[in-house]
């Protein structure tokens, strides 16, 4: 998506793009819900919005982006939703962050359900305003799980019968 002329002038630096993202995130946290806690911060040139439950609700989600190129939502267990796009307009940055925040809130408040069938271990479904959103495991988590399963199988074979 092509930024308009005004946004293109402002979009030159990483600092400016990250500030766009931080500003959007700060505006969202004003809509604080009673059973969740939220915080906004940075790590390097990445803006981060953390949402987590309170009391017995230990679910945790993080929306992160440098304000351009990639946007990510990470939840417990290594599941994530990622979006990659170059030259993201300021409006698109806001819309993506708002959408990922909405998904994060739905996850923290209501949890996620496993996918059916073969994808059961590698995907989670979150219902957001009647829409089914799928988060998947990253490659490192999938490989770690496969190695763990393989080691368990080897141990079972090595036991005397």
Image (spheres, rainbow, N blue to C red):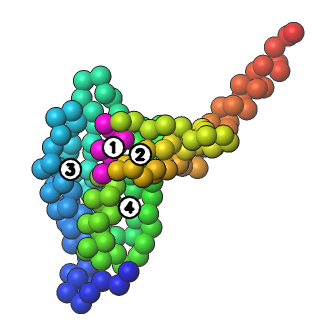
Q: Position of residue 127 (x, y in %)?
A: 41, 45
Residue 106, disc: 1
Q: Quadrant of residue 85?
A: bottom left
| 1 vs 3, front mark | 1
Q: Quadrant of residue 90?
A: bottom left
The residue that appears at 44% across and 63% down in the rendered structure is 83
| Residue 88 as seen in the image, left or right of residue 13 | right
Residue at the spot of label 4: 71
The residue that appears at 30% across and 44% down in the rendered structure is 105
**Label 3, label 2: how many angstroms apart (C-alpha)?**
24 Å
**Label 2, label 4: how many angstroms apart (C-alpha)?**
20 Å
Residue at the spot of label 3: 40
Element marked by disc 3: strand
Between disc 1 and disc 4, whose residue precedes? Answer: 4
Between disc 2 and disc 1, whose residue precedes? Answer: 1
**Label 1, label 3: how many angstroms apart (C-alpha)?**
18 Å
Between disc 3 and disc 4, whose residue precedes? Answer: 3
- Toward the front, the furthest residue is 130
The residue that appears at 21% across and 68% down in the rendered structure is 20
Magenta extent: 102-109
Q: Nearer the viewer, residue 114 or 139?
A: 114
Q: For the C terminus, which image quadrant?
A: top right
Residue at the spot of label 2: 127
Between disc 1 and disc 3, whose residue precedes? Answer: 3
The residue that appears at 24% across and 29% down in the rendered structure is 54
Residue 44 appears anywhere in the view: no
Element marked by disc 2: strand
Q: Position of residue 158 (x, y in %)?
A: 82, 18
**Label 1, label 4: how many angstroms apart (C-alpha)?**
18 Å
Q: Are the residues tagged 3 and 4 within 8 Å (C-beta)?
A: no
């Amino acid at each position: 998506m092509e930024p308009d002329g005004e946004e293109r002038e402002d979009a030159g630096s990483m600092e400016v793009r990250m500030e766009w993202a931080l500003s959007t995130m700060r505006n969202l946290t004003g809509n604080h819900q009673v059973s969740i806690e939220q915080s906004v911060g940075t790590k390097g040139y990445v803006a981060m919005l953390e949402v987590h439950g309170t009391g017995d609700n230990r679910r945790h989600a993080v929306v992160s982006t440098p304000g351009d190129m990639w946007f990510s939502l990470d939840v417990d267990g290594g599941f994530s939703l990622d979006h990659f796009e170059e030259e993201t307009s300021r409006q698109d940055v806001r819309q993506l962050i708002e959408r990922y925040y909405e998904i994060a809130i739905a996850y923290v408040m209501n949890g996620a359900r496993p996918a059916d069938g073969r994808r059961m271990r590698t995907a989670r479904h979150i219902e957001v305003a009647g829409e089914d959103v799928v988060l998947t495991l990253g490659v490192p988590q999938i490989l770690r799980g496969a190695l763990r399963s393989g080691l368990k199988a080897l141990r079972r074979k090595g036991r005397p019968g």
